[in-house]
Image: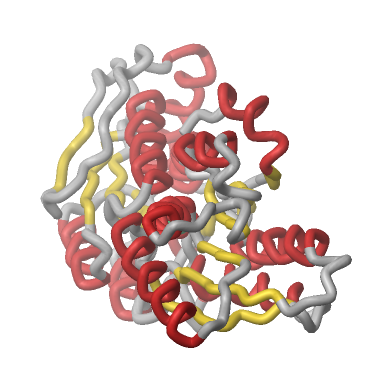
């Protein structure tokens, strides 16, 4: 991480910090911090600083508060920052790229030690990332990737393999449909247009369902990762399926919130989610496990939002001049309906 290495003094102070932490210096366990919703305003989270510690300041530009997953992700980052003694400057971009760019510029102006963010969409980041690099501030991506030619614009990307999540969802369906001789009409609720999880989950799912010619995506639209839009889009799908006399057999939702919105729409339409229409979802929030336990979701592919501790460790490492793996992939599972009751008490988000 030559390009981001700061002065020798900073490295030495960071080494002292790490040593202190390793010797049991960490702060007291924080109270659970709620996710910031609504305001795009920036908030600071500070913790008592131990004598001699060089406190790392991190600017974090969050996507928004669009889903249960995001709320858990924000909480994990805020709690982990407190635990690690990292001063966190946090901003909520309300799902708008221009707000994230503004926040990153403000962190550059404030000369933070590290910038981290979960990019709302994949493209359009070159200019601001170059500004951070020119200012000598390392950038860590969490959760979502960026599409840039020059990958030296960020030091590491910590998060899930969304293509693989799409494949896991597809594999479950291919297996479920293996003895079916009839065509199965799938409707897809996509995440935010242009976002990495929407692009990749679609790609992985399509790649796998190609194996079975009976499996066809007949409609696909964005529900922007929210419950409200998931419900709205599903209502429209159901209406047109009725007028076209083309039944819907499967919903593939790119996240749990949209699946939960779709479930409401299906019930209001007089059908049984999980029985009349199979529901496949991604994330694994508690509400989805409750719906699965009630027989309304058939399978959930896990996407882990608890990235805070890994992010704080990465920030400490990069400030200490250590090189980070370019890609840190989160480990995740698949939960079919029959596992829901047993797994529900273990869910942490
Ligand atoms: O980037 C991760 C995705 O963003 C989650 O699957 C979704 O719930 C969130 O809004």
View extreme (right): residue: 179
Please say if 51 is above or below 53: above
Viewer-proximal residue among 138 and 306: 306
Residue 186 seen in the figure: yes
- The colour scheme applied to this rendered structure is secondary structure
Viewer-proximal residue among 107 and 242: 242
Q: Position of residue 112 (x, y in %)?
A: 26, 49
Viewer-proximal residue among 340 and 201: 340
Q: Where is residue 298 in the image (x, y as percent from the top left)?
A: 64, 49
Q: Residue at point 24% right, 45% down?
A: 90
Viewer-proximal residue among 52 and 108: 108
Q: Position of residue 290 (x, y in %)?
A: 51, 34
Q: Residue at point 50% right, 42% down?
A: 288
**Relative side of 276 to 223, left or right:** right
Q: Residue at point 53% right, 49% down?
A: 283
Locate ligand 1 by image quadrant: bottom left
Res 139 quadrant in image: bottom left
Please say if 84 is above or below 288: above
Residue 118 seen in the figure: no
View extreme (bottom): residue: 244
Q: How many marks?
A: 0
Q: Position of residue 336 (x, y in %)?
A: 70, 44
Res 96 quadrant in image: bottom left
Res 258 quadrant in image: bottom left
Please say if 79 is above or below 169: above
Q: Residue at point 44% right, 57% down?
A: 270
């Amino acid at each position: 991480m030559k390009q981001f290495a700061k002065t020798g003094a900073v490295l030495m102070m960071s080494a002292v910090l790490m040593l202190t932490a390793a010797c049991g210096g960490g702060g007291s366990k924080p109270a659970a911090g709620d996710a910031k919703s609504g305001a795009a305003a920036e908030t600071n989270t500070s913790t008592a600083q131990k004598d001699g510690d060089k406190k790392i300041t991190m600017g974090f530009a969050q996507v928004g508060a669009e889903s249960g997953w995001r709320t858990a992700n924000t909480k994990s980052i805020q709690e982990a920052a407190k635990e690690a003694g990292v001063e966190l400057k946090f901003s909520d971009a309300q799902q708008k790229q221009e707000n994230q760019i503004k926040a990153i510029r403000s962190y550059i102006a404030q000369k933070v030690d590290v910038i981290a963010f979960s990019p709302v969409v994949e493209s359009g980041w070159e200019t601001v990332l170059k500004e951070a690099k020119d200012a000598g501030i390392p950038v860590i991506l969490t959760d979502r990737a960026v599409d840039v030619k020059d990958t030296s614009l960020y030091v590491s990307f910590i998060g899930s393999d969304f293509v693989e999540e799409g494949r896991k969802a597809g594999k479950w369906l291919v297996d479920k449909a293996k003895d079916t001789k009839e065509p199965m009409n799938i409707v897809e609720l996509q995440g935010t247009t242009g976002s990495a999880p929407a692009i990749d989950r679609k790609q992985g799912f399509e790649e796998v369902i190609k194996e079975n010619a009976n499996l066809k995506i007949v409609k696909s639209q964005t529900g922007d990762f929210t419950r409200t839009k998931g419900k709205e889009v599903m209502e429209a799908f159901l209406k047109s399926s009725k007028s076209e006399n083309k039944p819907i057999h499967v919903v593939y939702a790119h996240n749990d919130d949209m699946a939960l919105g779709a479930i409401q729409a299906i019930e209001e339409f007089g059908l049984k989610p999980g029985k009349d229409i199979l529901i496949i979802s991604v994330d694994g929030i508690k509400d989805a496990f409750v719906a699965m336990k009630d027989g309304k979701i058939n399978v959930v592919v896990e996407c882990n939002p608890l990235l805070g501790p890994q992010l704080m460790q990465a920030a400490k490492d990069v400030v200490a001049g250590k090189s980070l793996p370019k890609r840190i992939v989160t480990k995740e599972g698949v939960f079919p309906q029959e596992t829901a009751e047993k797994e529900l008490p273990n869910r942490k988000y």
